[in-house]
Amino acid sequence: MTYATRTNHLKAEGAYAVLAKAQALEADGREIIHFEIGQPDFDTFANIGKAGMDAIASGRTRYTPPAGTPSFRRAIAMDASARRGIDISPEQVVVGPGGKPHIFFPTLALVNPGDEVIYPNPGFPTYEAMIGVAGGKAVPVPLVEENNFSFDLDVFDSLINEKTKLIIINSPSNPTGGIIPQADLEHIAAAAKKYDAWVLSDEIYARIVYDGMDDAPSIYALPGMAERTVIMDGFSKTYAMTGWRLGYGIMPEELARRVGLLLTHSVGSTAEFTQFAGIEALNGDQAQVTAVIAEYERRRNVIVDGLNSLPGITCQKPQGAFYVFPNIKATGKTSDEFANWVLEEAGIALLPGTSFGEFGEGYLRLSYANSIENIEKAIEKIARVLK
């Protein structure tokens, strides 16, 4: 049998491979503390769950327009306009089952074989995967610790050219928790306009920010960028709705029409009742969001202090998301060696930085969507292993 070459480069996400190892150890009776999976440990907020169940009970289980129900698209447009400080119409909103369709389908609609796509490394593995499926050339730009894990702009400037069709950014970042500062966003925007490139801005963690910050700044709001920017956002992280599979893209209307057609001929439409739950998430009481972010901030402070107390490890304090990306170069171990070592010896499941690309070597990713009790226990166990 032969298969299409467009799938040859695809591989599983590292988080699921580590999870499988950790679960095998648990099946043998080992206690494992999980920091590998990037999802909230809170239940979906009760008012959102009730809205979804009420929608099912009232028969909201039918097909919807592929781009989403009009009422949900209006709610998203109103919320996004208010938070990003720019007018967004419902016709620019495309709803899909999760955030990944709004990474894949805009890329398929924009990138021709041979076009170059700049993306962050270390970064979310789906970026590189989707570039290959579209037939594009993946061009990684390192995120540098010295710049709070923003782009290395010198490397970026050396790589962008007339062949660059798309620039992918992610702020706050998975895996680093870094936020791209306003000046860097302006630099990237100027380059995008100079070379007539599109920008895909992954803003799934935009509301999970700390130290009194409002939402992370969006490149979409910069002058002249709305016409060449795609925002990817969703409900998984902010509202603890990972299993609901509910996300959306914001983009120029013509691109939204084309992405809507790709949805039509792939998934068809997003479950109607989840869209009703999404309306409640946006329009309901946001106090729960504020409380959860405050709890993440407390956990961030505990895990950063704990990691910095360990020999051979240094850890920046992330500005957003719920990940830390500690530097382990002084331990003398590679990222894979360290991750396997602490899983086997200490029962701590975490990810090597190389799960997110070659420039993640020398780092680890830990999700602190876990209790402070478990975070403190994990630090103690790692400390014993390091000694």
Image (tube, rainbow, N blue to C red):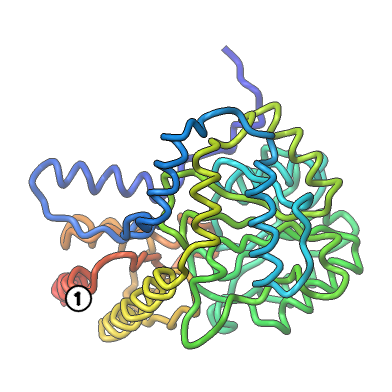
Which is nearer the eye, 144 or 69? 69
Where residue 269 sits, quadrant-wise, is top right
Q: Is residue 17 left or right of residue 130?
A: left
Q: Can you identify the residue that label 1 sits on?
A: 376
Residue 35 visible in the picture: yes
Q: Is residue 61 above or below residue 108?
A: above
Percent x, y for residue 356?
A: 50, 57
Identify the residue at horizontal 38%, vertical 49% (top origin).
50
Identify the image quadrant of the N terminus: top right
Identify the image quadrant of the C terminus: bottom left
Is the residue marked by circle 1 packed among few (<14), some (14-19), or many (20+) residues within 10 Å? Answer: some
Q: Is residue 27 left or right of residue 171?
A: left
Most extreme residue toward the left, as rendered? 29
Percent x, y for residue 56?
A: 44, 35
Percent x, y for residue 251?
A: 77, 54
Identify which amino acid the numbered label 1 is placed on: Glu
Q: Is residue 136 above or below residue 290?
A: above
Which is nearer the eye, 283 or 290? 283
Where residue 250 sits, quadrant-wise, is bottom right
Most extreme residue toward the top, as rendered? 1
Identify the residue at horizontal 78%, vertical 46% (top origin).
256
Which is nearer the eye, 96 or 176? 96
Identify the residue at horizontal 64%, vertical 56% (top origin).
75
Which is nearer the eye, 355 or 45? 45
SS for dot 1: helix
Where residue 304 sits, quadrant-wise, is bottom left
